[in-house]
Amino acid sequence: MLHLGQMRQLEQAKKMFKNVHLIAGVTEDDETRRYKSHIVNSMDERVEMLRHIKWVDEIIAPCPWVITRSFFEKNNIDFVAHDDIPYTAVQTVSDKGPGFTGIGVSEGGKKMESGDIYKWLKDEGKFKATHRTEGISTTECVVKILQNYEDFIDKFLKNGMKPSELNIDVTKATSILIKKNVNKLVDKLLRQITKITLTDEPLGTGFNYRVDELRSNLLKAITLWLKKYNIALTTFVRLNEHSDHKPFLPADNFSSPTGAEESKPISDKIEDTVSSELKSPTPSTNLNFSPESIRGIQSKSRSSNQPTVVYTFGVFDLLHYGHARHMEQVKKMFENVHLIIGVLSDDDSIRCKGRLIQPLSIRVATLEHIRWVDEIVPNCPFDLTTEFVTNHRIDYVCLNKDPSVNTSSPVWNELRRTNRVLNIPKTVSMCTSMLMLSILRNYELYIQRSLDRGVGRRELRLGYAKERSLKVKNSMKSLQKKLNGELVKATLTDKHIGHKFDKNVDVIIEKVIDTIDNWRRDYDHLISEFAKYYRGLIKRDEINF
């Protein structure tokens, strides 16, 4: 997932010398997973996003994780630029295939003396260090999504997604929906209490009336909550009698699933409504088109050197290649385009999308690295005005299809009447929601990855029991992986069944028993430590796991 910190490093590399041809190398998916755990974007998607960064002149994909001398010379490279953090745990290249080692490698599988894979480049003066942007990383972006996991799950469920599509069971989905509905009722009650207690009126009829009103609202809220809770339990029982793949109804009233129409996944809904939109991450070769909705625009009279000013606006949270492609299409609509990007404020973004991962400053700074952008307007108006269009000398405005944006106002109607509205198709294979879904579906994997990278459980909003449970589960997965290796080793042998084969099987059985014993021991220890901590017998820093 390309972010502002990486874009700034590309900018640093581009500006190291007066005339730089910058080549960006992208590792293939399997190799990236080997060293970076899970990946959010595929190699093709990462390549497509890099294509839109104005500092990049050429892309090599796939490229090796370890830069060898032959790769360096083959591509006529003068210097390698990267942040100056020693990278270890790299591949050992040999005739038997890749393996792991704690130190770097050179060609032919020969180990280096140092743990830094860039050592030979540094020794020969061919390495240039770039600097990271503090507080901005892929981990930071992922953590912000994980912190609001239940909020995002609640939103996707209410938009029609099934629990199975979010990689959760019906029980968890129902629990999240009930919790969010209860929270809404509590918030409503708190507002009522605040309204009554923060009054300047003296005690009397008016004050007592509001207290009675609060009492009445409280009883109604509790009654409503009990009703929803009972319906939710009934719904859960009926759903649980079937399967997780049956229709899941996330509506606020938790109505009975009987006879309900099965909801489509969000991705299906998008493709149904915009079936003609771009779907592949492969760069499109036919972007200079003129939609029917803007017929007659080429006849507009203007001097040949005067640019056509086109305006598009949005949130641009977690900027991805879908956003960048949209900008490319707009930029190539006419021969000479001055593209203005409006970025909504944080409040308007939340109003528009219901959530926000990156603040305005980060969203604006990220857009500055896109090659198609000529001008950025932070805090652009949510509702387009005639004054804004006039002040920025805007010729055409891109249609914003977000349902919260009022495109039927007099300003929009006038723009339509004069054929000044551009209806640009979106890239349905990528949107911010899909990016987040990739992370939410692998919640535990990303939580464990964040914990391994030093993120505290409180920062991830994890309870003590949940954190320990994940550690036990992770240790079990490691043991399972080890056992799988032993099974393959024993069964994929050329030796006939006999003493040695039986011996290998006996070893596997012993390891299975040992694995189960280890799991039981870890589980018992987890429960014991948690019970002691809960009863106050031990302090938090005395917990040993």
Image: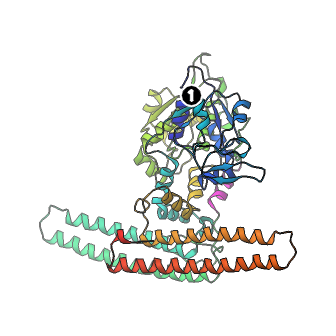
- Residue picked out by circle 1: 14
Magenta stretch: includes residue 545 = no
Question: Going 37% across and 70% down the picture, which residue do you hit?
Answer: 185
In the picture provided, is 345 more to the left or to the right than 19? left
Query: What secondary structure do most residues of the magenta stretch adopt?
Result: helix
Neighbours of disc 1 within 10 Å: few (<14), some (14-19), many (20+): many
Residue 474 coordinates in the image, percent (x, y): 56, 68
User: Taking the image as drawn, is residue 41 in sight?
Assistant: no
Q: How many marks?
A: 1
Residue 494 coordinates in the image, percent (x, y): 86, 69
Question: Going 42% across and 69% down the picture, which residue do you hit?
Answer: 463
Quadrant of the rendered image containing residue 488:
bottom right
**Above or below, 199 relative to 277:** below
Give the image's coloring scheme.
rainbow
Disc 1 is placed on an element classified as: helix
Residue 17 coordinates in the image, percent (x, y): 55, 22
**Above or below, 195 relative to 15:** below
Viewer-proximal residue, 464 or 108? 108
Question: Going 44% across and 60% down the picture, which residue do you hit?
Answer: 460
Magenta stretch: includes residue 269 = yes
The amino acid pointed to by label 1 is Lys
Viewer-proximal residue, 339 or 25? 25
Viewer-proximal residue, 495 or 465? 495
In the picture provided, is 463 more to the left or to the right than 420? left
Range of the magenta residues?
265-275
Residue 123 coordinates in the image, percent (x, y): 58, 32
Viewer-proximal residue, 188 or 284? 284
Which image quarter is the C terminus in?
bottom left
